Image (cartoon, rainbow, N blue to C red):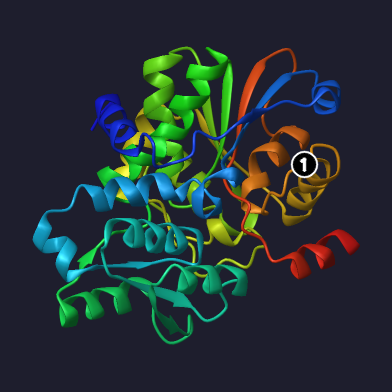
Amino acid sequence: MDYQDVVRAAGRLEGVAHRTPVHTSRTLNEWTGANLFFKCENFQRAGAFKFRGAYNALSSLDEGQRARGVLTFSSGNHAQALALAGLLLGVPTLIVMPRDAPEVKVEATRGYGAEIVLFDRDETTREELGRRLSEERNLTIVPPYDDERIVAGQGTCAQELFEEVGPLDVLVVPCGGGGLLSGSALSAQALSPGCRVVGVEPEAGDDGCRSFRAGVLQSVADPVTIADGARTPSLGVLTFAIIRELVSDIVSVSDGAIVRAMRPLWERMKLVVEPTGALGLAAILEGKVEAQGKRVGVILSGGNVDLAVVGRLFAN
């Protein structure tokens, strides 16, 4: 796949997905010595960038697939996004979610009309249960990240950022399964060829970092991290191939660093950003990404957060 897939996805999303704002902060620019441009996907429909890929995927289905319905597995943001896309397009959705998924994300997914099947991480994997249910009910699986339609949709986020602010020296992107990172890299290659694209993971889920350095896919089992949007077992086959070709680096940050990055986003910029969404800024503030003197894009991937949980994080 290539950037033209992103262009086609943008056409399907026009007038449906929000063209989210780009915010700046004089304070954070002073702290980092950089010009930071924050792409605020916390203002996207369903609260995260995932709506882009989900809607692009469902709008690409044929009539028979739409009528039978779709299935996915997700801890929250892709679940909500697919449920909303299904509601808008009249496609029944079945979502496989872990029992420990954030309640705010479970309720939002249910509120968009999806059927939810909860599972215990100790008893099965979401992929195994999802495959079984899809076979039993003849449902089309729409994976959370390892799918060309998903990657193309996610790439429209960075596309919009480059269209608004022009070329960048660095683009910093949260990374779970790699859909947003690989899609962003496709847009960067086309619209800002000299831009370094850097993915950021939580330390507990550093499979992408290890995969990037080893050159072969690595995995991690149920990482314990506050960045629940990045608790994926591994990068996808498709996303890893794009990342190896187009991404400059993948780094990891601690949960403590994530909370430290969330504070200025909430307190100074007044942006409700979930832990996964703060990964990029955390990497900059921790010195994992060289930003001084550079024009840096930072994708804030989502804002679906349990306020009670955030209260406990900020209290520590």
186 w.r.t. 121: above or below: above
Q: Say which of 208 and 268 sits in front.
A: 268
Q: Say which of 65 and 124 sits in front.
A: 65
Please name the residue shown 28% across and 56% down the image: 89
Whether residue 130 is visible: yes
Please name the residue shown 55% across and 74% down the image: 107
Please name the residue shown 35% across and 29% down the image: 245
Please name the residue shown 90% across and 63% down the image: 315
Please identify the residue farthest to the right as the structure is shown: 315
275 w.r.t. 238: above or below: below
Work out which quarter of the rendered image holds the N terminus and state it: top left
Q: Say which of 66 and 296 sits in front.
A: 66
Residue ID for mark 1: 265
Q: Amino acid at mark 1?
A: Leu
Work out which quarter of the rendered image holds the C terminus and state it: bottom right
Task: Using the rendered view, name the quadrant where residue 23 is placed.
Answer: top right
Whether residue 316 is visible: no
